[in-house]
Image (cartoon, rainbow, N blue to C red):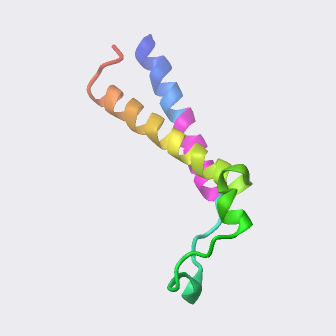
Amino acid sequence: MIRTIFTVLFIIVCIALIVVVLMQEGKSAGLGSLSGQVDSYVSKNRGRTREGKLERATVILAVLFFALAIGLCLKVFM
């Protein structure tokens, strides 16, 4: 019973991770990235932007994904 709950939770986390990754913008900056990153208002306040929130959500969902995957593989949730 509890394994089924964690399997469903795992599937929900997988779908959410896919959606969040697909919502992010590309990181290709072209030749401008060779000179280093310029400090600007956007780069200083990255965590408050939509892109910053998506990056944070990606990290959280990735940690949940790996924790649930390892737990289900090792049959911890039995």
Residue sitting at x 39%, y 32%: 67
Is the C terminus in the top left, top right, bottom left or bottom right quadrant? top left
**Camera-side residue of 37 and 69:** 37
Near-viewer residue (59 or 33): 33
Location of residue 42 in the rendering, given as x and y in whole percent from the top left corner: 72, 64
User: Which residue is depicted at the point 44% across and 10% down?
Assistant: 1
Residues 69 and 37: in front is 37
Is 33 drawn above or below residue 6 in the view shown? below
Q: Is residue 42 magenta?
A: no
Q: Is residue 16 magenta?
A: yes
Residue at screen point 66% across, 48% down? 53
The image shows residue 38 at horizontal and vertical percentages of: 61, 76
Residue 46 versus residue 16 in the image, above or below: below
Position above or below: 34 against 53: below
Residue extending farthest top: 1
For the image, the number of numbered tags is 0
User: Which region of the structure is painted magenta?
Assistant: 12-22
Q: Is residue 53 left or right of residue 33?
A: right
Residue 55 image position (x, y, % from top left): 59, 52
> Which percent across, then down, holds residue 2?
44, 12
Report the residue that reaches farthest toward the left: 74
Main SS category, magenta section: helix
Q: Judge from the rendering whether residue 9 lies leftward or rightward of residue 40; answer left or right.
A: left
Q: Which is more toward the observer, 66 or 51?
A: 51
Q: Residue at x 34, y 26 (%)?
A: 71
